[in-house]
Amino acid sequence: MNLIKIDSNSLIEQRVKTTPENVEEANNALFYATMNLPAAAKHCGMTHKEMKMTFQEYLKYHPPTYKMD
């Protein structure tokens, strides 16, 4: 019998270490809509809830870049 052997360790993604640089990149990407929330959370090693809270803090201190007429 020919069974395909799959290494289970190769299926598990390594956790990304959360650094201020990664968080800043993710927040800027969310602000300019170049990354969605799940991708940003994965980029900086956070959960979705942690990323949402971090982004809400980011929005408090960064004004909108558009002008309303």
Image (cartoon, grey):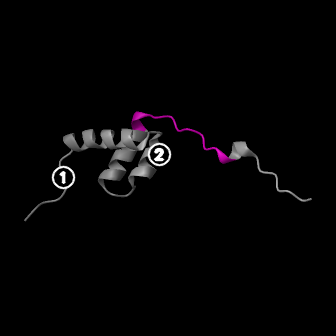
Q: In the rendered structure, which amino acid carries the disc numbered 2?
A: His
Task: Quote the CA–CA distance across marks 1 and 2.
Answer: 24 Å
Residue 6 located left or right of residue 14: right
Task: Give the percent coordinates (x, y) of residue 9.
Answer: 71, 42
Which numbered circle lies on residue 64? 1
When asked about the image quadrant of residue 35, the answer is bottom left
Horizontal arrangement in the rendering, residue 65 relative to residue 5 (left or right): left
Q: Residue furthest bottom?
A: 69
* Residue ID for mark 2: 43
Mark 1 residue type: Pro
Instruction: Note whether 17 is above or below 39 in the view shown.
Output: above
**What SS does tag 2 mark?**
helix
Instruction: Identify which residue is drawn at 82% across, 52% down.
Output: 5
Image height of 48 relative to 20, above or below: below
Magenta stretch in the rendered image: 11-21
| In this picture, residue 5 sits left or right of residue 13 | right
Taking the view exactly as shown, the residue that stands out farthest to the left is: 69
Q: Position of residue 23 (x, y in %)?
A: 39, 40
Q: Residue furthest front?
A: 1
